[in-house]
Image: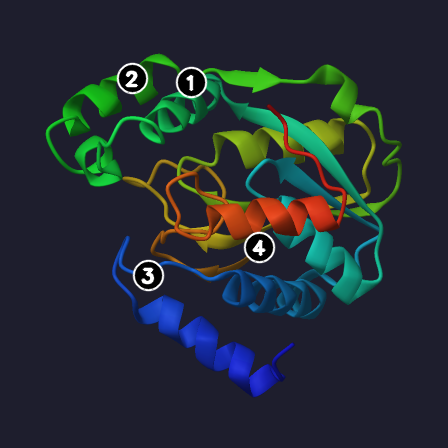
Amino acid sequence: MQDLDAMNALDEKYIRAPNHTLHMTIEEAENLSRLLARRIKETVGQPDLLVGIANGALMTTSLCSDELGAPSHIVQVRREGSRYKRRLLKIKEFIPIPSSWILFGPLKTLWGKFQNRYSKLEVAEDSFGRDVAGLNVVVIDDCTVTGNSIIYVADRLKAQGAGKVSMAVLCWTEKDGSMERRPEVYLHRNIQWYPWSNNSEYWPAYLNWLKQRKIEQWL
């Protein structure tokens, strides 16, 4: 684990980097997650409960929980298209199609239409069974663009009786002013290649990280 000065320097590196130019290593993800935990405590106080959103916040929520000494819980909320995206990228492992073709190249328009078509949220209702009455809760995600998922979770926890609900993310990269509320805590504004992305070179190491800690993904 790095000291605070080193973590802040790492954060500055990601603040300055343009979109999709950095491939975050496991070590960097660990240290940025710990830095996020410190920023959470500085900004909203000591949380009673951390609620992470599967699958993007599995590592960050676990490490924030360790850093803050606060219990954590994972809720399962995702855009409907995310499940199909995972399947598409799984196929890509066997067919040599560069990820850049999907995100930026010849398939960009098709991919954009696909995302818009499957923008409805998919929710695993049984993942919201945790009692949050009166608690200071922080909702954690890796990156938010429209805010649909994280705002849904925050509002739902508030409706379930949470005393205070805040949002914390590694990356807040708002698209066209589309977010109705900004996260209380964030580290950088430009999205990068995170190790939990299927197309990251650190994806196998990330899967091993989860396995060692007995953390399961939402499939």
Which residue was labeled with disc 4? 184
Here the colouring is rainbow
Which element carries disc 2, helix, strand or loop? helix
Q: Would you place residue 44 above or below residue 166 in this image?
A: below
Place residue 118 in its image quadrant: top left
Decide which of tag 1 and tag 4 comes sooner along the chain: 1
Alpha-carbon span between mark 3 and mark 4? 24 Å
What's the amino acid at mark 3? Answer: Leu
What's the amino acid at mark 1? Answer: Tyr
Q: Of discs 3 and 4, which sits in the foreground?
A: 3
Count neighbours of disc 3 (C-alpha within 10 A) and say few if under 14, some if 14 to 19, many if 20 or more. Answer: some
Question: Residue 13 location in percent, x, y?
Answer: 37, 73
Q: Residue at x 16, y 24 (%)?
A: 109
Q: Residue at x 22, y 37 (%)?
A: 98
Question: Residue 120 location in percent, x, y?
Answer: 46, 15
Decide which of tag 1 and tag 2 comes sooner along the chain: 1
Alpha-carbon span between mark 1 and mark 4? 30 Å
Count neighbours of disc 4 (C-alpha within 10 A) and say few if under 14, some if 14 to 19, many if 20 or more. Answer: some
* Towards the viewer: 179 or 124: 124
Decide which of tag 3 and tag 1 comes sooner along the chain: 3
Which residue was labeled with disc 1? 84
Task: Tell whether 211 sits left or right of 132.
Answer: left
